[in-house]
Image (tube, grey):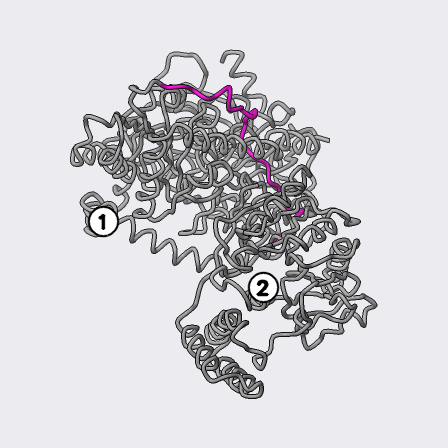
Amino acid sequence: MDALNTVAAVVVTYNRKDKLGTVLDSLLAQTQLPDWIIVVNNASTDGTEQMLASYTDHDRVIVHTLPENAGGAGGFAAGMARGYELGADFVWIMDDDCYPNRDALEELRVGLAKAEESMGMSLPYACSVVKFIDGEICEMNNPGTTWDWGRLLARGQNAVLVTHCSFVSVMFSRCVLTRYGLPLKEYFIWFDDQEYTLRVTKHAPGVQILSSVVVHDMGVNRGVNFADVTAANLWKFRYGVRNETSFRLHHQGVGAFLKFLGRLFTGTMRGNVPWGLRIELFRKAVEGVRFNPKPTYPHSVL
Amino acid sequence: MNDDTANQRTTAVFELLDEAGASLDEGTSRPLNERERRLVVGAATFHALCKPGRTIRLTVLRGPAGTPLRLTDRNVHRIEWPDDCEVVGSMVLRSTARPPAGSEPGTGLIDIVVDVGGPPVYEHIYGKRPTLFGHGRRMARFLAPIPFDALRQYRTDLLERQLRATTLARKPAVGLAHGITGVPGDRPAAVLFGLHWLELGGAERWALDTVQIASAAGFTPIVITDRASAHPWITRPELADAVVVPLTQPLDPGADAEFLNGLLANFDIRGVHIHHNTWLYQRLPWLKAQRPELPVVDSLHILEWRTGGFVDIAVRLSNVIDVHHVISPALRDYLLGRQGLPAEKVKLATLANLTGPDIAAVDRSRADDDPFIVVFVGRFSQQKRPYLFLQLAKRVLRTAPGEVRFVMHGEGELRNEVRSLCVRYGLSEVVELRGPEIPVATTLAEADVLVISSDNEGLTLTSFEATAAGVPVVSTDVGSQCSLVATELLCPRHPYPFLQAATKSVVAMMTSADLRKKWLEEQLVKAAAFTRLTDARSWIRELYQGWMR
């Protein structure tokens, strides 16, 4: 087999044309260029399509337009499947407000290869350090670490072992998609990244490469906290609660499920979230008990 | 003995001392046809290699049609035979095979009785199950083919999930640095091939190509088959220079070691190439223990969820195989991603043999009043599910916007069932059955769409042939069919969703010529991308040339 070296970068976008251009420019300026840049247009309505037209002359850029908004989960699943079908050995995925440093991909590649050699096994993914625009750590995109997270640091590598991470600059090997399938598109948004990265670290940990840095240009630098639920952001939390309930119960067991319910209860109580919203969230938790989608697998085309 | 035979015997390991009735010489008047003659030569080669120096008296029988061959198994030592077998010859040979190092040639006479079988017949698939259960199955499938198939597919789903979740255990590698049997070096350089059988099949076509490539590279191909068959392809020209040994099993205890030792002593075997041969797979650890430096490659074609198939065996023995050659991206991904084999051990090299047809070259215009022709090309077997195609015909007829005809081109164990179902469904007027006497190219030249209804495939050669002929393919989404077929024309494997999706696609093509053209264009783009992958013939040629150095 030829050396495993092709990379498909996948960007999922929805109505964010003002930032998407910067993302694509950052990708096209990488010290190690991705072989394909797949932009999944989640049926944007803000003129994204016209903006993307200026990039279609570039032979590496592929625009994959979905007929309807499939959410981040559906978009990533579609983009990763497309990269797999094109024959990519790695898929590197990110949001449409993620600006990778020029050497972000190169560092991921080199760091992953070194980590695999040191650990003596294939590792499912490598993720970047995600910073906010002010240079601080991005609250929402911190990976969870393994108990022996510093093993590679002790060996002189600039990397730590992780159990899960967000979909903001993470690179999966092709074998992971073959073995574990795609993210659950039914999740639509929220917790799809945790579910997937936890799923694929069953047999080996992921790795965060500390020298690979991206900037996440999100509006407010705040993590997911049930104390923050408001009527305006309820729609997102509804998906989050349903998805996490499903994951904790069906993939981790009753103990994890009850612990999650406790966290939901205390979080909303601490934030003094209105009772109507709390009830709505618990209703979604009940829905999550019955919600248990199964992964689909990409096609081996090339 | 004529010149051709003399040439062929340059690698022969026996000499003929006397013969009565049957003759082993080519071109002489004799009671054995060419297929039978080559089978007898194969049997003689096997016994001569097993018993160097011994004199062998070979009694040749021919049983009635369909009788299994008896060439190398333990029954060849029985000197009685059933009433319906006729004696067609007797011959005395002397093994000229060199004995393995450290042993002396044997002496004395051995009596061997071989049976070349009768004329080959298609074995009915349920002939293997002459039980009440087998009869019940056959009836169930004939009376309710679709529910029957739906149950089969649910079973496949279950097994597929199990197999996907399993990482197969592997035999340990052989840790020796070199072999211990020193043999003189004036033997012909050879490549040892393991084949399933010598019958029509995609894997067999590729196997014979490799035999020919080895021949052209200057090797003596040694071809061993391990599956019961009449071996109709034993007369193919690709095998003209090969030493062919069709094994019939079970062998005598110890005969496998005698045979392989005989091969190692008489041929300078430079490499092993396995094409679906369980017997040779299972003896690889022993072979590697004797000759650790011997390169071993296998060719894999199809994933079989129900049994694991040859892919499963190959993974278990991966530590004694140097390179797994796979013909499709799906197999490559399975071996790397699912079974965790190292990338350097898996080589994707395709059998596409396409030269990138373009839409302008293959787009055929058709008059509006021409009937739309839907074709099925393939063996009439359970795997190909011809009964699904007939159901599809029924459904398309109901909704077709114009005149439509169906052609089923093939042969196989379900042919009677196909004929009966045709009548039962009232399709006799619109379905034409064609046998192998008509070239597939003729059928494809008339076709408007090819339908592949198989429940399992690797990557069908028929799809490539259809692409070259400019025919869009509607196919079940199995194996690597997605490498060639337009995404919207891939249908689920389960029978009911398949019928729904395939009917919709065929009717859509009849309704809209533009849609048909769009799907064909996508197929051609995929074909063009596929042809850019490594070509198997070039790769294997280079590999064998490396073995010659």
Q: Which residue is mark 2?
A: A200
Q: Secondary structure at mark 2?
A: helix
Residue in the image at 34% along x and 23% along y = B436
Relative horizontal placement of residue A38, taking residue B334 as reference (left or right) = right
Quarter holding residue B536: top right
- Depicted A233 relative to depicted B86: above or below: below
Q: Nearer the viewer, residue A29 or A54?
A: A54
CA neighbours of label 2 inside 10 A, class few (<14), some (14 to 19), many (20+): many
Provide residue B454's location: percent of width, then percent of height.
Answer: 37, 40
Q: Range of the magenta residues? A: B340-366
- Depicted A210 relative to depicted A18: above or below: below
Host chain of mark 2: A
Q: Does label 2 lie on the same chain as label 1?
A: no
Residue B510 visible here:
yes
Q: Nearer the viewer, residue A275 or B219?
A: A275
Give the label on residue A40, or none: none
Circles 1, 2 touching at the beta carbon (< 8 Å): no
Looking at the image, the residue that sits furthest to the right is A156
Q: Nearer the viewer, residue B156 or A88?
A: A88
Relative horizontal placement of residue B262, taking residue B544 as reference (left or right) = left
The amino acid on which the numbered mark 1 sits, given as a three-letter code, is: Arg
Q: Nearer the viewer, residue A58 or A301?
A: A58
- Depicted B289 relative to depicted A53: above or below: below
The amino acid on which the numbered mark 2 sits, given as a three-letter code, is: Val
Q: Which residue is mark 1?
A: B137
Marks 1 and 2, how far apart at CA: 42 Å
